[in-house]
């Protein structure tokens, strides 16, 4: 059943603003793949911090958060914003500055420079698969909201929101992401925090606390396996550490105009993600009293917005959920299509390796990167729509997405940055064994130990990489100086470097 005309007009205004603003950023791309993917590496602190915030403040950290809190307890929901905020702190502390200095265009570029093309392709494929799941989770969340407002069926709403994201993203790339993030993130933050405070001061906490079941709000969600502690810790660490190798966050790190800008922007995004996530989690608890008979937990937040809040706050919540989903979906779409365009297609199929590159060569490489990346977005979006149809659970999709890269990609990145003896055989062994172990445990872990299947594989990946690297030093010497070396523009754009 559709909502009233005022709700529909309000949401149409939101969507038109996002779409028009995103499409207008086509001008800033100027035929350049580097401008399209990382905005020419020119973004200042406020813009990078805003995009970091918008990328973590997605449909999973808001709508999925409230749904999981409602059905399984505070920590089952709050794990999403907590894990994402933790990731930004970890990234800012240990990864942002060295990776920004390396003048990377995509994250798999690091694995190519530090190890070789085989590691690059394997990592690129794993990251792309995980981000197709992430993209699916966010367009799914937005589609649920549109179906609730306009009375559409889920598939219609899914196609509409997917087309909006697709067209404005391929128009302006990261420039479109930045422009729309500003209009998406801050209204969402204001809406969630203001709605939480309005409910709290209108009804009082005692009104809500009587409906909260035992174990829903205490620390047992982190200490008692019977109350989901393993799963909650798995979610926090999968996001907090696994998201370090997230394509969307790293796009912003690479786009920062300086290493220090990248670092500070991570902390800014982490702080505001926690504030908004806490508000969404407590609204999930409040829903136990306000909407106790809701059939689908995914609709908890939208039901409260339309039935229990003043219109303006409800509209900001609904628009905030859609905007949060769009802000993460566009970054995910750009990240995956960039990896396919640069690290898989251009490097391995459309490669041009020369000893010297003229200005015309550089422009041609840059423009071809733009074309290939835009074309790669078509199958990526199609795959995400399919995934959103068969697995439309936003909260669970996010954890699953980063289990994949957490298991096999984090250790080669970390040791590649901080251990000079890390080499290609070690990285390959860490990736393959960590990933395969994750798949094995997914199907074979006993139900009472669920969650450990996320935590064990990265540890095994580390245990494997160190001795393999040490045993193969002579035959496969590590590449020294890669992390500290600042490449030239010609090297950055070439497929050889």
Image: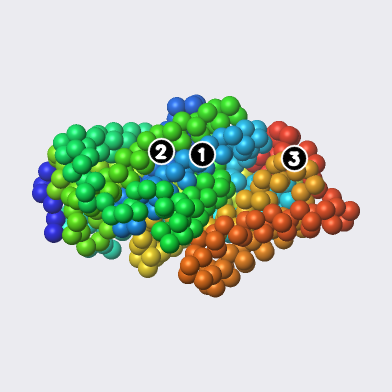
> What is the x, y in percent for residue 468?
79, 58
Q: Which image quarter holds the C terminus?
A: top right
Decide: is 61 above or below 399. above
The answer to whether mark 1 and mark 2 are in CB contact below 8 A is: yes
Kindly identify which residue carries mark 2.
273
User: How are the residues colored?
Assistant: rainbow
Q: Camera-side residue: 11 or 370?
A: 11
CA gap, disc 1 and disc 2: 10 Å
CA gap, disc 2 and disc 3: 33 Å
Dot 1 or dot 2, earlier in sequence: 1
Decide: is 409 above or below 55. below
At x 67%, y 57%, the residue is 461
Count of numbered tags: 3
Determine which quarter of the picture holds residue 157.
bottom left
Disc 2 is placed on an element classified as: helix
> Disc 2 vs disc 3: which is toward the camera?
2
| Local crowd size for mark 1, using a 10 Å CA cut-off: few (<14), some (14–19), many (≥20) | many
> What is the x, y in percent for residue 296?
25, 61
| Local crowd size for mark 3, using a 10 Å CA cut-off: few (<14), some (14–19), many (≥20) | some
The answer to whether mark 3 and mark 1 are in CB contact below 8 A is: no
> What is the x, y in percent for residue 300?
24, 53
Left or right: 448 with respect to 356?
left
| Local crowd size for mark 2, using a 10 Å CA cut-off: few (<14), some (14–19), many (≥20) | many
> What is the x, y in percent for residue 256?
54, 31
CA gap, disc 3 and disc 1: 24 Å
Mark linked to residue 88: 1
Q: Which image quarter holds the N terminus?
A: bottom left
Q: Camera-side residue: 125 or 214?
A: 214
Disc 1 is placed on an element classified as: helix
Residue 349: tell me if it is visible: no
């Amino acid at each position: 059943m559709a909502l009233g005309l005022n709700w529909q007009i309000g949401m149409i205004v939101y969507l038109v603003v996002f779409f028009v603003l995103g499409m207008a950023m086509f001008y800033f791309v100027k035929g350049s793949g580097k401008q399209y993917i990382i905005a020419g590496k020119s973004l200042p602190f406020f813009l990078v911090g805003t995009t970091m915030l918008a990328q973590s403040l997605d449909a999973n950290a808001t709508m999925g958060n409230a749904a999981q809190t409602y059905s399984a307890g505070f920590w089952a929901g709050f794990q999403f914003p907590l894990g994402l905020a933790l990731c930004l702190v970890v990234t800012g502390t240990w990864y942002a500055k060295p990776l920004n200095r390396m003048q990377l265009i995509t994250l798999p570029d690091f694995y190519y420079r530090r190890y070789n093309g085989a590691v690059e392709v394997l990592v690129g494929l794993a990251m792309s698969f995980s981000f197709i799941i992430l993209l699916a989770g966010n367009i799914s969340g937005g589609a649920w909201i549109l179906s609730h407002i306009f009375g559409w069926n889920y598939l219609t709403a899914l196609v509409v929101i997917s087309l909006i994201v697709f067209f404005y993203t391929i128009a302006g790339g990261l420039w479109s992401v930045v422009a729309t993030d500003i209009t998406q993130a801050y209204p969402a933050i204001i809406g969630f925090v203001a709605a939480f405070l309005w409910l709290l001061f209108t009804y009082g906490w005692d009104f809500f606390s009587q409906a909260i079941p035992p174990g829903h709000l205490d620390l047992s969600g982190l200490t008692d396996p019977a109350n989901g502690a393993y799963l909650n810790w798995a979610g926090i660490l999968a996001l907090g550490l696994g998201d370090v190798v997230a394509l969307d966050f790293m796009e912003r790190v690479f786009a920062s105009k300086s290493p220090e800008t990248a670092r500070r922007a991570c902390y800014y995004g982490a702080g505001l993600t926690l504030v908004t996530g806490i508000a969404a989690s407590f609204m999930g608890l409040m829903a136990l009293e306000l909407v106790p008979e809701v059939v689908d937990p995914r609709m908890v937040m939208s039901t409260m917005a339309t039935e229990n809040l003043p219109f303006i706050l409800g509209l900001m919540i609904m628009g905030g959920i859609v905007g949060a989903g769009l802000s993460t979906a566009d970054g995910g779409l750009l990240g995956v299509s960039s990896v396919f365009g640069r690290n898989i297609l251009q490097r391995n199929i459309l490669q041009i390796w020369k000893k010297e590159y003229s200005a015309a060569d550089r422009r041609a490489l840059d423009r071809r990167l733009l074309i290939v990346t835009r074309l790669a977005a078509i199958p990526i979006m199609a795959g995400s729509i399919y995934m959103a149809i068969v697995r439309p659970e936003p909260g669970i999709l996010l954890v699953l997405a980063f289990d994949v890269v957490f298991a096999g990609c984090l250790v080669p990145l970390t040791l590649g940055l901080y251990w000079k003896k890390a080499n290609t055989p070690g990285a390959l062994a860490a990736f393959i064994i960590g990933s395969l172990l994750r798949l094995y445990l997914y199907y074979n872990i006993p139900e009472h130990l669920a969650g450990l299947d996320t935590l064990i594989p990265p540890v095994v990946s580390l245990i494997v990489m160190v001795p393999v690297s040490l045993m193969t030093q002579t035959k496969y010497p590590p590449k020294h100086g890669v992390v500290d070396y600042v490449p030239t523009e010609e090297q950055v754009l070439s497929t050889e470097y």
